[in-house]
Image: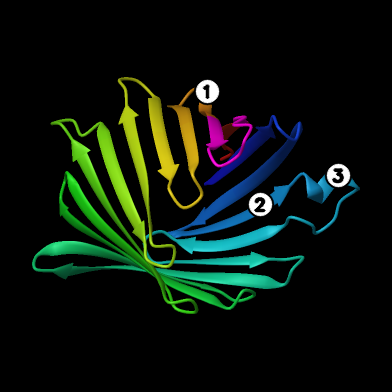
Amino acid sequence: MAKATLKGKYEAEKNTGSAVASVAFFAGDVKLKASVTDETVAKGPSLNGLLLSVEKPGTFIFDCDVPRKDFRFQFMNTIRVMEKPVNLTYIHFHGANRTTLDGTLTVDPANKLSCSYAFQTSNCRVKYAYAHGSLRRTVFEPCYDFSKKAWDFSLSRKFEGDDLLRASYETSRKNLKLEWSRDSKVNGIFKIAAAVDLAEEQKKPKLTAETTWNFDLL
């Protein structure tokens, strides 16, 4: 079994676009994936932008950045604390010598508590997610960054069909962002985002558009 993904992105401020293509092969419960960017073919075939990945869903991911000779390890596991599931993710970036540990406690279907800790900087981020209503389509997520001593907030609403609207605000950067996305099995994923830096004198929104298509090859 094999699947292909093509992702394109356009930034209105820079008037530039980029593209990423990937092919994934499944060997039992292991996924092998190769990804390339537009840099790979812009000036003739090259290794620029080539990323190789081996993944066992829910267990580990190994990424190798071929041109930079860099790699990343990611290990996932689930434990139970007081009969509640806790998802743990350990990530190590070799080139940046950076290691993080993420944990998510699912209190109930409507409430989740997450924590992310960076070992090199001792930075810690704690996030709480509350899904409102019987269908849990509205999600409120406050997040506190201990290194910045600042709060981030996000509010998302999923509508009937495939539409999702999300608003987020970073208090440390005074950055406001609005996103609209549609996830369709027929037309792929399409997203439009507008970000505004409220600290700037000219509060001009930065617009980006992304689209993703998935294909079954075999």
The percent coordinates of residue 44 (x first, y second) are: 90, 48
53 and 211: which one is in front?
211
Left-right relation of 158 to 16: left
Q: Which residue is mark 2?
A: 35
Q: Which residue is mark 3?
A: 42
- Amino acid type at image mark 3: Ala
**Crowd around label 2: few <14 · some 14–19 · many ≥20 (10 Å):** some
Residue 38 appears in which quarter of the rendering?
top right
The alpha-carbon separation of the residues under discs 1 and 2 comes to 21 Å
Q: SS at mark 3?
A: helix
Q: Residue at x 55, y 35 (%)?
A: 196
Whichever of callouts 3 and 1 sits on the residue coming sooner in the sequence is 3
Q: Nearer the viewer, residue 4 or 87?
A: 87
Could you tell me how many numbered marks the image carries?
3
Please tell me which of labels 2 and 3 falls first in the chain: 2
**Range of residues picked out in magenta:** 193-206
Residue placed most toward the observer, 141 or 190:
141
Q: Is residue 150 above or below residue 214?
A: below
Q: Is residue 26 magenta?
A: no
Residue 133 placement (x, y as % from top left)? 15, 31
Asked if the residues shown at circle 1 and circle 2 are in contact, with their CB atoms under 8 angstroms apart, the answer is no
Relative image position of residue 180 (x, y in whole percent): 46, 27
Mark 3 or mark 1, whichever is nearer to me: 3
Instruction: Say the numbered circle drawn on residue 14.
Output: none
In this rendering, would 86 be left or right of 56?
Answer: left
For image coordinates 69% across by 29% down, the residue present is 12
Q: Is residue 169 above or below residue 146?
A: above
Q: Amino acid at mark 1?
A: Asn
Front disc: 2 or 3: 3
Tell whether 2 sits left or right of 102.
Answer: right
